[in-house]
C-alpha cells in the first residue's frame, strides 16, 4: 500500500496555449498510466476543479518513498513538468504522506508536540 504521494497542481492555462495544454495533459495521462502498469507507482488520481481563482486541477501520484523519488528524477517526468510550466500558471509539486504514511506522520507530529510547552487557557 502506498504511503507517499506527489501532488502536482496547476492554475489557469496561459491564454493562447490551450491546444498545447490539452496535448501535455493527455501526454501526462499516458505517462502516468504507463508508470502504473510498469509498477513504478502504485496509482494516480486526476482531479479537474470547478472554476475558481487559484487551482484548476491536480494529479496525485501514489507509491512508496522510493517510487516517488525515482519518479521525480525520471527524465520523461522532468520533461513533462518543463512542458507544463510553459503552458500553465502556478505549477506546483508537493510531497506528502497518504494511507499508512499518515499514521507515521501523525506520530512524528506527536513526538514533536511533546517537546514544546502547551499553552493553556
Image (cartoon, grey):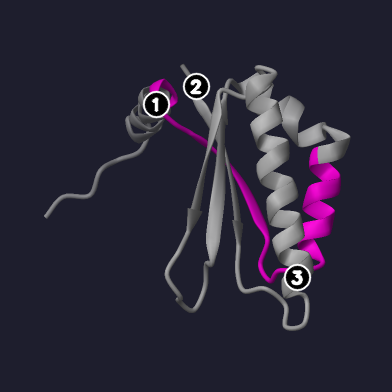
Q: Earlier in the sequence, mark 3 or mark 2?
A: 2
- Secondary structure found at label 3: helix
Could you tell me how far apart the alpha carbons at marks 3 and 2 are, in whole angstroms? 34 Å
Residue depicted at x 75% and y 35%: 72
- Give the labeled residue for mark 2: 2
Q: Is residue 96 left or right of residue 18?
A: left
Residue depicted at x 85% and y 38%: 76
The tag on residue 112 is none
The tag on residue 99 is 1
Say which of 31 and 89 sits in front: 31
Pointer 2 and pointer 1: residues touching (CB < 8 Å)?
yes
Q: Is residue 109 located in the magenta-colored stretch of the structure?
A: no
- Neighbor class of circle 2 (other Cα within 10 Å; few <14, some 14-19, many 20+) is some
Could you tell me how far apart the alpha carbons at marks 2 and 1 are, in whole angstroms? 6 Å
In percent of width and height, residue 63 lies at 57, 24
- Secondary structure found at label 2: loop
Pointer 3 and pointer 2: residues touching (CB < 8 Å)?
no
- Give the labeled residue for mark 3: 19
Pointer 3 and pointer 1: residues touching (CB < 8 Å)?
no
Quadrant in which residue 52 is drawn: bottom left
Image vertical order of residue 110 relative to residue 46, above or below: above
In percent of width and height, residue 23 lies at 76, 58
Amino acid at each position: 500500500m502506498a504511503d507517499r504521494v506527489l501532488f502536482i497542481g496547476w492554475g489557469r492555462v496561459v491564454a493562447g496555449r490551450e491546444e498545447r495544454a490539452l496535448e501535455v495533459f493527455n501526454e501526462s495521462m499516458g505517462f502516468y498510466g504507463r508508470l502504473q502498469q510498469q509498477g513504478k507507482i502504485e496509482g494516480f488520481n486526476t482531479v479537474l476543479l470547478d472554476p475558481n481563482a487559484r487551482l484548476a486541477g491536480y494529479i496525485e501520484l501514489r507509491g512508496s518513498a522510493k517510487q516517488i523519488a525515482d519518479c521525480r528524477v525520471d527524465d520523461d517526468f522532468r520533461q513533462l513538468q518543463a512542458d507544463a510550466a510553459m503552458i500553465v500558471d502556478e505549477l506546483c509539486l508537493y510531497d506528502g504522506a497518504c494511507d499508512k504514511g499518515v499514521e507515521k506522520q501523525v506520530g512524528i507530529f506527536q513526538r514533536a508536540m511533546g517537546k514544546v510547552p502547551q499553552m493553556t487557557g
